[in-house]
Image (spheres, grey):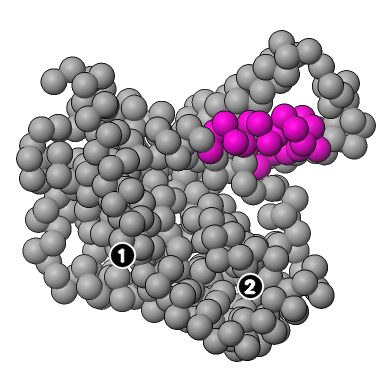
């Protein structure tokens, strides 16, 4: 089967099964990944992993990460990380990370695969959380503000740690581990310095309202959007040159592209275009390709799968609840934060996919992590519907959110 025919079949099946999943009240990502499993070696064996599909998967990851980064702001990250609130917001990451670390240590899992498990267990996908909050009409509540701030911090930490992990995995023979880790941290620090300089420059340009912020002919509009994309992709190239995965640079660069810099109209066009391409083409292709790489043998170790899923869900709920209570939210709203923090979605699969492609985890462990991410995401809407059944508490929460906005 040609590459074009494979892509057409994969995309069509992903959209059909994604639509069926939504009709059944489940996230589309469930059906899209099942499409890859059905077409891949696990069931029909019509499609198999190959260089062509892998290249498309890398391009899909690029668009997924750009779309995720454009929904965040570097300023929001700095605001969330300042003051005593940093400790509270960190609990959404630290509680599941500690629990997963203990679990992997008890099993005797090797260091690098264990860290990947910890990252996948601890991540919260901000884009997924935003869509869930918006879909349930909660975007203007205190639940949304606390969840978004913590998710933003969590995603940044996970991406940066993954960069160090990839650098460590390529340790050269005869080089001490301490030197390898130190070099990786120095390279990552250099990347962060570059990001900091660019953030300063972008902030100054935003305040000065440069000439490209004014209305311009269509050709100028196109050039500015192209420059924005090249800026983000260029950071990915710099990130790769420093020994990290390209998503780290792309993700950080996307945080710097704002409406204040290129004008709100252009930014909305850029964001909507990337989101449209991600939702309609690259997102389904990415998820379906993960299904092709899925190994049915991962289902044989039911104890490991169920235990890891339970740890991932329960500890996220605990960490989110503790975080919300430390932020002085009432119990009802704290339960909502705990549920939202359990959203992993595509970001967890991106982390697992990059780790697998880099040789950090086995195919069986990669498949297990995919199932954990899907299960955690699937149960989140159901838990939210149950939580919102208390109409009196919900109305009080909405009023409190509007008054504090």
Question: Which is the main secondary structure of the residues drawn in magenta?
Answer: helix
Query: Residue 233: horizontal and vertical position, in percent?
Result: 55, 26
Q: State left or right for residue 10 relative to residue 343.
A: left
Return the residue nearer the eye: 238 or 321.
321
Secondary structure at badge 1 equals: helix
Q: Residue furthest right?
A: 208
Q: Check residue 143 in the rendering and tell me which mark sits there, or answer none.
A: 2
Query: Residue 210: horizontal and vertical position, in percent?
Result: 88, 25
The image quarter in which residue 108 lies: bottom left
Tell me the residue at 27%/34% (across/down).
12
Residue stretch rendered in magenta on the structure: 254-275
How far apart are the two marked residues, 1 and 2, measured between alpha carbons? 23 Å
Q: State left or right for residue 398 relative to residue 347.
A: right
| 264 drawn magenta | yes
| 11 drawn magenta | no
Identify the mark nearer the N-term, 1 or 2. 2
- Total marks shown come to 2
In the picture, the quarter occupied by the C terminus is bottom right
């Amino acid at each position: 089967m040609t590459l074009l025919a494979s892509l057409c079949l994969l995309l069509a099946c992903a959209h059909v099964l994604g639509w069926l999943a939504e009709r059944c009240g489940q996230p589309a990502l469930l059906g899209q990944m099942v499409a890859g499993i059905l077409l891949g070696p696990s069931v029909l064996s019509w499609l198999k992993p190959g260089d062509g599909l892998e290249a498309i998967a890398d391009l899909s990851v690029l668009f997924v990460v750009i779309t995720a980064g454009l929904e965040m702001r570097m300023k929001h990250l700095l605001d969330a990380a300042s003051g005593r609130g940093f400790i509270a917001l960190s609990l959404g990451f630290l509680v599941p990370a500690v629990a997963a670390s203990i679990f992997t240590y008890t099993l005797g899992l090797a260091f690098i695969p264990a860290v990947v498990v910890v990252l996948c267990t601890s991540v919260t996908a901000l884009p997924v959380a935003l869509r869930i909050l918006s879909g349930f009409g909660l975007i203007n509540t205190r639940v949304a503000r606390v969840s978004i701030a913590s998710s933003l911090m969590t995603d940044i930490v996970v991406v940066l740690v993954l960069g160090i992990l990839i650098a460590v995995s390529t340790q050269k023979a005869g080089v001490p581990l301490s030197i390898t880790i130190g070099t990786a941290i120095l390279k990552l620090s250099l990347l962060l310095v570059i990001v900091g300089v660019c953030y300063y420059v972008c902030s100054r340009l935003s305040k000065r309202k440069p000439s490209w912020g004014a209305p311009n002919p269509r050709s100028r509009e196109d050039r500015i959007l192209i420059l924005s994309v090249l800026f983000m992709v260029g950071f990915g190239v710099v990130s790769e040159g420093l020994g990290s995965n390209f998503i780290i640079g792309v993700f950080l660069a996307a945080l710097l592209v704002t409406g204040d810099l290129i004008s709100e109209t252009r930014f909305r066009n850029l964001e909507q275009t990337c989101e449209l391409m991600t939702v309609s083409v690259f997102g389904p292709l990415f998820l379906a390709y993960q299904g092709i790489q899925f190994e049915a043998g991962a289902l044989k170790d039911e104890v490991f799968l169920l235990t890891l899923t339970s740890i991932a869900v329960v500890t996220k709920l605990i960490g989110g609840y503790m975080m919300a209570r430390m932020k002085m939210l009432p119990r009802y709203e704290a339960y909502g934060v705990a549920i939202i923090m359990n959203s992993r979605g595509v970001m967890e699969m991106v982390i697992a996919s990059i780790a697998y492609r880099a040789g950090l985890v086995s195919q069986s462990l990669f498949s297990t992590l995919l199932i954990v991410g899907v299960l955690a995401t699937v149960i989140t809407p159901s838990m939210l519907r149950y939580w919102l059944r208390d109409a009196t508490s919900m109305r009080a929460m909405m009023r409190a959110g509007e008054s504090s906005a």
